[in-house]
Amino acid sequence: MRFIHSSDWHLGQTLRGFDRTREHQVFLDWLLQTLEETAADALLIAGDIFDQANPSAEAQALFYRFLADARRRLPRLDVVAIAGNHDSPGRLEAPRRLLKDFGIHMTGHCSLQDDLADAPTDGVLDRLLTPLHSADGEVCAWLLAVPFLRPGDLRDGSGLGHQAALRAVYRRLADAALERCRNAEALLAMGHLHVQGGIVSELSERRLIIGGEEAVDVGVFPEEAAYVALGHLHRPQAVKDHPHIRYAGSPLPLSFPEADHPHQVLQVDLGGEGVVITSLPTPRAAQLLRLPAEPLSLDHVVELLSTYPFAPSESGIWPLLEVRIREAILPVEFRQRLEAVLEGKPVRLAGIDRYRPALPDPSVDEAATAPARADARRLDPAQVFARRLDEEGELPDRAELEAAFAELLDQAYQGQGGRA
Ligand SMILES: [Mn+2]
């Protein structure tokens, strides 16, 4: 069997106020065509479908239009999607019953206490355990579709730690799947979480700190899983020493530092050869440019921009530009100068990253003072909190404080729809 693994679409995202809908549309059109060309049996979407818990009507229309087109053009395709930390579990799962009749499986939430305490019931298993079918309609794999789990989802009264509780969730589902296996079908798992050793991307991945731990051990996944389709980290990568445990990464850059990622979806073939994984690069619908490569003075930057060969992408979308300026004091009219030099050029000015020249006084510890002056938009609230805790010196309950802060932050994002 063959399936496509993708994640972290973040439909509805805006980057510094610029809408990404056309870029997402180019990706979704490409994905449909790719599913057709590769004759895939299934599509696995490992969370963060939407950028916000309360996505815009436009973002939801993008998603549901894609599902409808997929159903029409690929009537046999199994689609399985789980909620990520950006998605609202309830909202994602609301149309579950309707979509299930079209071969589309959405899992928003899962609770160790309520759903999986003892022997999970059939109703629960239907939500969390999905059969995947090959071309002849036979069940050829069972997929454990575990959405992003919050601390409350993993409390079961037995005092299991976060990691042990997560392992228990996968174990119970794996046991139930093995019971359902008839002809040695493959076992596959899906998750939206941060596995230890993963390379993080700044700015766009909301940090997950649960139970004082930022990342979980790879041992939470059942050993029998032939492939583990992960979401959350935006850089595509395999978990160290586990080539079959993979992050597909986001299909397009969600922040300027992500512009260099090799954006892709993964094609996974299960068969006599074992597991064969092929990277399929996604189209770059809009360029994200950071100019210059190293920050320069305003005069130098203006000069560079005046001659830079900006051009729309193949899809006709103008690049987004972040300019990098190194100046001790910026003249008040710096923005007008940048806008003037870019006027009439096919480019959208999305950000000005300002750096300060090194301080002349060698007694000033720049490393210690620089973060305090960083652009507020670039500060991670959890890092600000950590810095504040640093000032308190040794704190015996630091891990607990950080975990409580992370939980509050998560609730705040859920409430207001999150950030990029
Ligand atoms: Mn994400």
Image (spheres, helix red, strand yellow):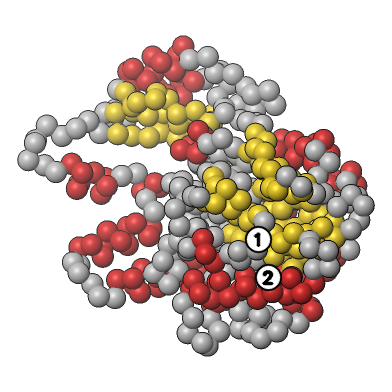
Q: Nearer the viewer, residue 29 or 325?
A: 29
Instruction: Give residue 120's position: percent from left, percent from top.
Output: 71, 81
Neighbor class of circle 2 (other Cα within 10 Å; few <14, some 14-19, many 20+) is many
Instruction: Give residue 35's position: percent from left, percent from top.
Output: 79, 41
Say which residue label 2 marks. Answer: 174
Q: Of helix, strand and loop, which one carries label 2? A: helix
Compared across the picture, whether 97 is left or right of 129 comes to: right
Q: Of helix, strand and loop, which one carries label 1? A: loop
Q: CA distance from mark 2 to mark 1?
A: 8 Å
Vertical position of residue 419 compared to residue 144: above or below: above
Tell me if I can see residue 105 in this picture: no
Q: Farthest residue toward the bottom?
A: 157
Mark number for residue 23? none
Instruction: Give residue 6's position: percent from left, percent from top.
Output: 67, 47
Q: Quadrant of residue 144?
A: bottom right
Q: Nearer the viewer, residue 55 or 216?
A: 216
Q: Nearer the viewer, residue 182 or 228?
A: 182
Q: Residue at x 71, y 35 (%)?
A: 26
What type is the residue that disc 2 sits on? Ala
Tell me if I can see residue 386 in this picture: yes
Q: Are marks 2 and 1 in contact (CB under 8 Å)?
A: yes
What type is the residue that disc 1 sits on? Ala
